[in-house]
Image (cartoon, rainbow, N blue to C red):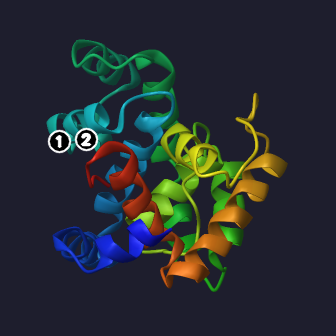
């Protein structure tokens, strides 16, 4: 995709580089801050990333202390589509903070970390687990959301939109993104930011 190479040498490329440095610096933050990023990724499932960012900023330390009932009410008031289930997932994940910290500091590679997160943290699928890892500086997993799928379809990199995002289908699409990342000389985490910009005109997180 020539467009990506053009963007790499533009102001967009500078913004991407800044965002990547931000992600890597997140990795060095305290476990409480990393947990709040996990909460953000739980909120993004079947929901707008932009709206989830606003909710994350509003609740902030509340992710660490609010009861499930209070968190549910807060999410509802802030307009989240699934306040009950997301509050439940976050409160359950809160109990896992020491274990999450231990695993993130282990020698597991990124794919193994993702498998652990999907298996052990309710509310995280492959997309959400990949999103969390990328946002704390692990740059070799793909965030396969509908924006990325639509773009890959448009450029003929996949043949059809998957009806259900199974693990097998996710990995198949990720392999396509790995090929593309090698072609344009980017990590998967960087590539996602460029693809998101191409599809939405925005660089979020």
Q: Residue at x 53, y 47 (%)?
A: 151
Q: Quadrant of residue 62?
A: top left
The furthest residue to the right: 168
Residue found 76% across the figure and 31% down from its top: 164
Residue found 31% across the figure and 35% down from its top: 52
Left or right: where 49 falls relative to 176: left
Q: Are marks 2 and 1 in contact (CB under 8 Å)?
A: yes
- Image position, residue 22 (x, y; %): 24, 72
Look at the numbered disc 1 and give the secondary structure of its residue.
Answer: helix
Real-space CA distance between mark 2 and mark 1, rounded to the nearest whole angstrom: 6 Å
**Residue 196 at x, y percent in the picture:** 39, 52
Q: Position of residue 35 (x, y in %)?
A: 38, 55
Above or below, 43 against 10 in this view is above
Q: Nearer the viewer, residue 134 or 88?
A: 134
Quarter placement of the C terminus:
bottom left
Number of numbered callouts drawn: 2
Q: Which mark is residue 53?
A: 2
Q: How dense is the environment of label 2, judged by Cα within 10 Å: few (below 14), some, or many (20 and up)?
A: some
Which numbered dot is residue 57?
1
159 in relation to 27, above or below: above
From the top left corner, tell me how far across and down residue 84 is, in percent: 46, 16
Q: Nearer the viewer, residue 48 or 137?
A: 48
């Amino acid at each position: 995709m020539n467009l990506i190479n053009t963007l790499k040498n533009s102001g967009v490329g500078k913004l991407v580089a800044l965002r990547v440095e931000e992600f890597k610096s997140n990795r060095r933050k305290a476990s409480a801050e990393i947990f709040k990023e996990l909460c953000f990724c739980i909120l993004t499932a079947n929901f707008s990333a932009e709206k989830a960012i606003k909710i994350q900023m509003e609740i902030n330390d509340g992710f660490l202390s609010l009861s499930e009932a209070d968190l549910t009410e807060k999410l509802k008031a802030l307009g989240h589509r699934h306040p009950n289930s997301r509050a439940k997932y976050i409160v359950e994940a809160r109990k896992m903070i020491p274990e999450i910290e231990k695993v993130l500091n282990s020698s597991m590679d990124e794919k193994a970390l993702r498998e652990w997160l999907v298996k052990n943290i309710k509310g995280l699928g492959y997309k959400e687990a990949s999103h969390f890892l990328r946002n704390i500086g692990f740059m070799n997993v793909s965030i396969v959301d509908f924006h990325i799928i639509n773009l890959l379809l448009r450029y003929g990199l996949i043949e059809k939109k998957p009806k259900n995002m199974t693990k097998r289908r996710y990995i198949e699409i990720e392999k396509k993104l790995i090929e593309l990342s090698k072609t344009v000389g980017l990590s998967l985490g960087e590539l996602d930011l460029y693809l998101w910009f191409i599809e939405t005109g925005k660089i979020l997180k």
